Image (cartoon, rainbow, N blue to C red):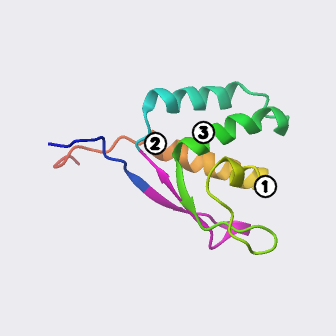
Amino acid sequence: MLDKLPIKTKTFLVTGEYEGWQFEARVNPPIGLFLEKIEALQTSDTSNPAKVAPAVYDLLNLVVIKWNFKDESGNELPAGVDGLKRLPFDLLLLMCEAIKGEAFTVPLAPGSS
């Protein structure tokens, strides 16, 4: 018997301009909290990065565990809100899309096809 909820993670490889970067994220987040974060993101004004950024930070902070991201000087960025605030907007959106797609994937039961 499990004494705590298992945390399932996946490593996401970033492509394009960020080739070689990767992040590990939880793919079984608490669904109620996850849906709240997704809804906040979807209802925010996406044409204004200042309005949508807090929702992006909340979503990613809920699921991202670690990454190999570095700043302009090559220094490691801490995973978490402080590090998220130092990432470019396009990278943040790529991360959100990757996680959103994975978290809503329902695995087949063993023996199913």
Q: Residues within 10 Å of mark 3 (few under 14, many from 20)?
A: many
* Observer-nearest of 90 and 58: 58
Q: Residues within 10 Å of mark 1 (few under 14, many from 20)?
A: few
Disc 2 versus disc 3: nearer the observer: 3
Q: Residues within 10 Å of mark 2 (few under 14, many from 20)?
A: some
- Where residue 7 sits in the image (x, y, percent)? 36, 48
Residue tagged by mark 2?
103
User: Per the image, is 20 magenta?
Assistant: yes
Mark sitting on residue 113: none
Q: CA distance from mark 1 to mark 3?
A: 16 Å
Residue range highlighted in magenta: 10-27
- Where residue 12 sits in the image (x, y, percent)? 53, 60
Residue at image x 79%, y 28%?
A: 45
Q: Earlier in the sequence, mark 2 or mark 3?
A: 3
Left or right relative to 47: residue 103: left
> Which amino acid is tagged 1?
Pro
Residue tagged by mark 3?
59
Under tag 1, what secondary structure?
A: loop
- Where residue 81 sits in the image (x, y, percent)? 67, 47
> Which amino acid is tagged 2?
Ala
Q: CA distance from mark 2 to mark 3?
A: 12 Å
Q: Is residue 11 above or below residue 110?
A: below
Q: Is residue 5 above or below residue 11?
A: above
Residue tagged by mark 1?
88
